[in-house]
Image (cartoon, helix red, strand yellow):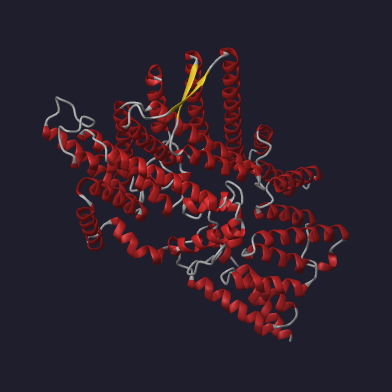
Amino acid sequence: MNILSPISLLLVSALVIFSPLQEGGTTHPAQMIIRLLIVTWLGIVLAAGIRAGRLAIPVLTMRYVVLAFVGLALAATILSPYPHPSRQWLIMIAGYATLFYLLVSFVDRWEHIRMLTLVIVLMGVGEAGWAIMQGLAWNVVRPAGTFFNPNFLAGYLTVTWTILVSGAIYGYRQIPAFSRPWMSPVLWWLGFVTALGMLFLAVLFTQSRGGMIVCLVGTGFVLTARYGWKLAGSCVAAVVLLGLFVPTPIRDRVLTEHQQNPVSYARWQMWQGAVAQMVDHPFGIGLGLYQYTYPLYAFPIDGEISRFGKVAQTPHNDYLQMGVEMGPGAILVFGIGVVLLIRELRQVLQSRLRRWQRSLIVGIGGGVMALLTHAALDSSLRESALAIMLALCSAMIVSAARLTRRGADAVYVIPIHSRWTWGIGVACLVLVVGVEVTRLGVAWMKFDAASRRAIAGDTDAAIEGLKAAVSLDPGKALYHHGLGSVYARAFEASRDKQAFQLAYAEFKQAIELNPLDSRLLGLLGQLYLSAARVSLSPASLDDQQKVWLHAAVQVYERAIQLSPFSAMYRYEQARLYWMLGERSDAERRGKEAENLEPNFLPARALLARLWIEVGQVDQARGQVREILARQARYKERSMNSLDHAFMNVDVGPLLVAVGETAVAG
C-alpha cells in the first residue's frame, strides 16, 4: 500500500475538494464523478494487489455491521416497487462502504491523518470565505456557499470548526499538524483566530438553527475531551444563554421563524409520519421512495394557504428515513456501528498519544459527533459532501485505533495465484461499474438539456434529447414523464392522434415503472381530458368524449388513493363529474376538496356554480362571499405558484350568475 500513498492521497483529496462544489454533490454529474473516482481508486488498489500477489483487507470490528447494512440495502432494493431509485441508492451505499474500507487501508500512518485533516481544514475555510462573500458582497440572505442548502453548509463547516478549536486549546508549537518551524506565535495565533472567526461568521450567516446546535455539540465534545464534562457543560450553557440575549441572525430567525414559516416547526409531525410508515412497513418501503409514500401520511400545516400542499422529500431525520426505506432494523444496525465507532474513538483517546495526535483525533471526533447529531435534525447525509466527510472522519478514527495497537491489528490476506484471471476479473468489474455509472450520468445530462429546450419551445430538439435519455436509462420514470409531457403539449397544439398515442404510451410506461407517484396519474388524467375537448354542456358530449372523461375519472380515483390529502385531484374529479352531468358526485368531491383545503378557492367556485345551476342562490352567494374574504385576507402575503393556484379565481362571472339566478327565482 505504501507505493499507492501518493495516488491514494491525490484521489482522497480530489473527493474532499470536489464533493461540495456542485450543490454539495447532489447533482447527477457530481454523483457520476464521485462514483467514478471511488471506482478508479478501487481499481488501482486491486491492480496493485494483483501485481504484489496478495490482497490485504483490514479486519475491522464493525465489518459485520457494514455487511449487514449493505445487505439490508440490497433487500430493500430487491423488494422495492420502483427499482430504479433504489438501485441508485444501493450503488451509493455500496460506494460509501467501499470508500470507507479504502480509506482505512490507505491511512496507515499518522502523517496521512495529518495531511487529510489539512485538506478538510482548507476546504472548510474556503467554503466559509465563499459564504461570507455571498453574504457581504451579493447580499444573499442565507448564503449556502457551494451547497444546495445553507443548513448543510453549516454542518460541513462544523467539522473544520471542531478541528481548529481542538488545535487551539491544545496550544502553540505542540501541534505540528498546524504549524511550521518558521511560524511565529503571533502568526500562528493570528491564523487560527482568523480561520475560527471566518467559520463562526459563516455559520451565523447561514442562520441555521441546526447548524448552531451541531456546532455546540462538536465544541462541547472537544471541551469535554480536553477539560472534562463539568467545564464543557458550563461553557456550552454560557454560550446558549449568551445566544438567547445577544442579537444575532440566528437568534432573530428563531424568534420570528414560527410566525413567518409554520413549516419550519413541522419536524415533529414528519417524524410521527415516519414512525407510522415503519409500523406499516416493517421491512421498508424501498430505498429512495420516501417522497412517493409521504402523501399517504401527509399532515396539515395550519397558517399556510395550502395546508397539505408541501410534499416532504425527506423526514428531516436520516435515521428515520433509514427505518422507513430499509426497515427499523437498519436503524439498529447503524446504531451498533456508531457505538463501535465511539468505542474505537474512546480507545484512541485512552492511549498514549503525542499532543498533536490527540488534538487531531479530538477534533475529528468532534466533527463526527456533530455530523451524527445533524443527521438526527435533518437529512444531511443525503448530501454527498457530508456523507463523504463522515466516512473520511470515521475511517481516520478507525485507522488511528489500529495505529495505537500496532502488531495487534488484523489483516485478511487473499493470495493471488492466477494474476491473469484476477486481472481480467477486476478489469471487467471496474469497466462494467464505470460504464453503468457513466450511462446513468450521461442520461441525466441528456434529460436536463432536453428539458431546457422544451421550456424554450424547441420541441423537436427536446423530443430527440428525451428519447436519447430514455434509450440510455429506460427504467427511470422521470424520463418517460418528461417525454410524455412534451408529446402531450404537442397534441394540445396540433390535435395530432399520433402525438396523443405517443404521450399515452410514455405516461403508461412511467406509471408502470413507478406505481407510487400520483402525479403521473394526474398527467394521464389531463391527457384524457384534453382528448375529450368538451364544452360546458353535458348534452353536447358524444360517446367518445364520455369514454375519455370516464377514463379520466378512473385515473383520478387512483391518484386520490395514492395521495388522499390532495384537494387538487378531488377538484379535478369533481369537474369531470360536472362535465358528465353527475352533479351529486361533483358536489361530493367538491366538498371533500373544500374540507381538505379551505383556501382552495377553485373548489369553492365550482360548488357555487353547481348550486347556481340548481337554484340554491343563498348557498352560492355564501361561497362567493367566502372566496372574496379569503382573497382579501391573503392579498398582501407573499405567494408561490401553488398559493396563486389556490387563490386565483375570477369571482365576477359568479356574481353575475348569482344575480341573474336570484332575479329569475
> Does residue 154 show up?
no
Looking at the picture, tell me which residue is in the foreground, 485 or 416: 416
Residue name at image x 64 percent, y 44 percent: 478
* Residue 573 located left or right of residue 9: right
Residue farthest to the right, as pictured: 543
Which residue is nearer to you in this view: 528 or 656? 528
Q: In this view, does 618 lie above or below 146?
A: below
Look at the image and tell me whether residue 240 can be seen. yes
Residue at the extreme front: 408
Total label count?
0
Q: Residue furthest bottom?
A: 665
Which quarter of the rendering shows the C terminus? Answer: bottom right
Image height of 148 relative to 518, above or below: above
Report x, y in % for residue 487.
72, 43
Q: Can you say whether 513 is above or below 612 in the image?
A: above
- Residue 159 rendering spot, x and y as whole percentages: 32, 42
Instruction: Locate residue 587 relative to residue 90 in the image: left or right.
Output: right
Looking at the image, which residue is at 56% across and 53% down? 324
Q: Nearer the viewer, residue 602 or 279?
A: 279
Q: Residue 484 at x, y = what percent? A: 70, 44
Give the image location of residue 244, x and y in percent: 25, 62
Q: Quadrant of residue 183?
A: top left
From the viewer's perspective, tell me whether residue 591 is left or right of residue 193: right
Residue ID at (20%, 35%):
355
Q: Quadrant of the N terminus?
A: top left
